[in-house]
Amino acid sequence: MSKSIRIHETGGPEVMKFEDVEIGDPGPGQVKLRHRAIGLNFIDVYFRNGLYKQPLPFTPGNEGAGDVIAVGEGVTDFKTGDRVAYCSAIGSYCEERLINTGTLVRLPDTVSYETGAAMMLKGLTAQYLLRQTYKVQPGDTILMHAAAGGVGQILCQWAKALGATVIGTVGSRDKIALAKDAGCDFVIDYAKEDFVARVGEITGGEKCAVVYDGVGQATFPASLDCLRPLGMFVSFGSASGPIKAFDINLLTQKGSLFCTRPTLFTYASDRERLDTMASDLFGVLASGKVSIPINQTFALKDAVAAHKALEGRQTTGTTILVP
């Protein structure tokens, strides 16, 4: 038996129940994993409230770190006792689980379980956004919405290390210092300032090469007005609600813009690419250019409280759950 958070119907945080679940033995290509730490991410909310569909009942969560405690038939790339971390595999809100090895990466001895659980989804998201979706170059000016958030703090540090000028937005004054500490050259409180006008002032009218937007409805379509001609709008989340259907001719009118809605699940679906992405992430972490702030820790049994804090914008940086 494993203590797990289970969702039998979609809805608010209160639909998550702390229950005993029978795990069984790993099958072919699987290992049994004992969690040491579990990542909390806004995508967990989308699964919980039904925005992202999942057969009921299910265990939420997409990220964790721990130890391999059993291996299934045909597994040769991992063994009992290996320290591992993963993301993009729903079902992490539990003490123990079965998981396919295709989603696992070995956790370096220099990286704690807590950091491993905190950084996989957010760190690999920052990796694909910066190094693949739009490859940030020295001298680029970029705009990162929610710069004080989990992805935001990692991405801003990394972008600064790549030589970019980083403009970040935050939703309240108390998050300005966090965004500056994460490497932002300029921080805009979009609750009190017109971020489009400020971006124009900061860039002398040149605007940005790319806008990374995990906020969604509240910052669209204004984000498009922050882009230079041929710039790229990258929508990778919907913290304020999903972007509604829009006239694609807007992209023509605002400078022949590019627009994309990528997901980590697509980028990390290939074993070779996942290993390359993880190596890149571990490397920049080891260099000291990027650190992973874990600002909140909740017990697994208190997942309801953790979700309430996350949705209430009461968290900063990264939050983890501990079994």
Image: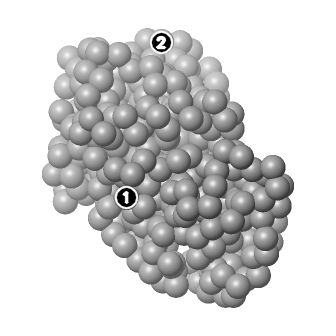
Question: Residue 2: percent from the left, percent from the top?
Answer: 66, 82
**Quick check: 17 left or right of 257?**
right
Classify residue 286 by image quadrant. top left
Q: Residue at coordinates 68% horizontally, 33% vertically from top-left?
A: 270
The one nearer the camera, 186 or 139, is 139
The earlier-in-sequence mark between 1 and 2 is: 1
Q: Is residue 145 above or below residue 160?
A: below
Q: Secondary structure at mark 1?
A: loop
Does the rendering let one see residue 10? no
Q: Residues within 10 Å of mark 1 (few under 14, many from 20)?
A: some
Tell me the distance, in whole angstroms, between the alpha carbons under discs 1 and 2.
41 Å
Rendered location of residue 170, percent (x, y): 29, 49
Three-letter amino acid code at disc 2?
Answer: Leu
What numbered label is drawn on residue 112?
1
Which of the two residues, 48 or 251, is positioned nearer the viewer here?
48
Residue that mark 2 sits on: 230
Which of the pair 155/245 is nearer the observer? Answer: 155
